Image (tube, rainbow, N blue to C red):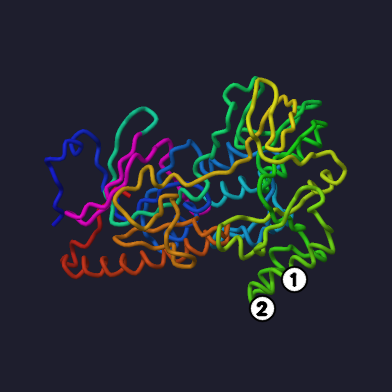
Amino acid sequence: MFNFNFMDPDFFSRRCVWVNGPVIVGAGPSGLAVGACLKEKGIPFVILEKADCIASLWQKRTYDRLKLHLPKQFCQLPNFPFPDHYPEYPSKKQFIDYLESYANHFDIKPQFNECVQSAKYDEACKLWRVKTVAGNGAEVEYICQWIVVATGENAERVVPEIDGLKEFCGEVLHASDYKSGEKYKGKKVLVVGCGNSGMEVSLDLCNFDAHPAMVVRSSVHVLPREICGRSTYELAMFMLKWLPLWLVDKILLILTWFILGSIEKYGLKRPSVGPLQLKNQRGKTPVLDIGALEKIRAGEIDIVPGIKRFTCGMVELVDGQMLEVDAVVLATGYCSNVPYWLQGNDFFSKEGLPKSPFPNGWKGKDGLYAVGFTRRGLAGASADATKIASDISKVWKEDLKQKRQKVPTHRRSISTFY
């Protein structure tokens, strides 16, 4: 028997919904993948999404020229390959179309415009209580046995505190708000960050005849997207089947040197740790070059050191240089938002990532699961989604079996809202 606390003042102030299956928080690729795997096993679920569409990061917070950085076979979700006519590296629009088709194929219908305020495991009733607020202010509490955290590593933008940035007179925007370099033609744009986003934004600005300068504060691995006609990622995964990680790193760096040459003379210092090891240890993804390095060599993208402070129309760098800039693009990345709403658990770190290292970061206790936190892209999310659905299915089947044994044959049925 469930032991609900009716003295809780919130209990009667919001609509309560019993979910006869898991609640999935987030309707991005990770959440959709879990939903599809559960559908295949006949398990009902609810997906809660604070935006008004699936994959809101892709649909609303990415630049126009974006393409998948990895070949499509490493980015497809479970049980639904990309169309054959798609190129090896699908565009942003093609990937969004694929996700829409994925949701339609598995009849996945998220609850849009519902922002999760809190989720907490109730020890008294041994169930999860997930409280949400809709766009119209309506409050709902979902009661469920399982919760799947699918908000991912990139839920919220990271905006660094930089001295004087608020006094800067020009435009300041995060890369999530950048669409294209068209309106920056002829302008001097400072791009803060040298990851894949920073490199691609700088390249896009060049293509629209802007004058970008890219801030590089730390070391960075830049690898060719392809080596000898094969995806660098695909080649690395193939070698890892036979060779230790440190040796694969060595081979990749030697091949990269032959293809790209030395990059340190352009202000891009390589880390002392290899690219794959760095990804495993710190989650830092190497840059896959799609043309930015050529622009850097040609002097069309300037490399500058860290920022000391901003003034009205200028930026002072740590080496004393003063640069006149018209706009600033913060390609400073994203972070998890899990610590803001998931309460009373020690599965996630204060940074909002599972404490257990890969491959054990997909399952917590008391019916808590996480998907999309492996730092291994869409392939990692798909693998976790499959494991989560299989794990829930075991308990689901056992519970169903017990219910059928307790209910007379002529009265066997399961009533649920979802």
Q: Which residue is mark 1?
A: 251
Amino acid at dot 2 = Leu
Counting from the top left corner in percent of width and height, residue 71 is at 69, 59
Verify CB contact (< 8 Å) between mark 2 and mark 1: yes
Indicate which disc, 2 or 1, sits on the residue closer to the N terminus.
Answer: 2
Task: Check residue 193 for magenta coloring.
Answer: no
Task: Check residue 114 for magenta coloring.
Answer: yes
> Which residue: 75% across, 65% down?
253
- Direction from residue 313 to residue 28 in the image, left or right: left
- Nearer to us in this view, 364 or 195: 195
Residue 271 shows in this picture: yes
> Which residue: 80% across, 36% down?
206
Separation (CA) of disc 2 from disc 1: 10 Å
Displayed quadrant of residue 302: top right
- Nearer to us in this view, 142 or 412: 142
Q: Helix, strand or loop at disc 2?
A: loop
> Which residue: 72% across, 44% down?
199
The quadrant of the picture occupied by the N terminus is bottom left
Q: Residue furthest bottom?
A: 242
Q: Which residues are magenta?
A: 105-133
Q: Residue furthest left?
A: 7
Counting from the top left corner in percent of width and height, residue 230 is at 77, 65
Q: Which residue is mark 2?
A: 243
Classify 10 Å Cα crowding around label 2: few (below 14), some (14-19), many (20 and above): few
Q: Helix, strand or loop at disc 1?
A: helix
- Direction from residue 225 to residue 375 in the image, left or right: left
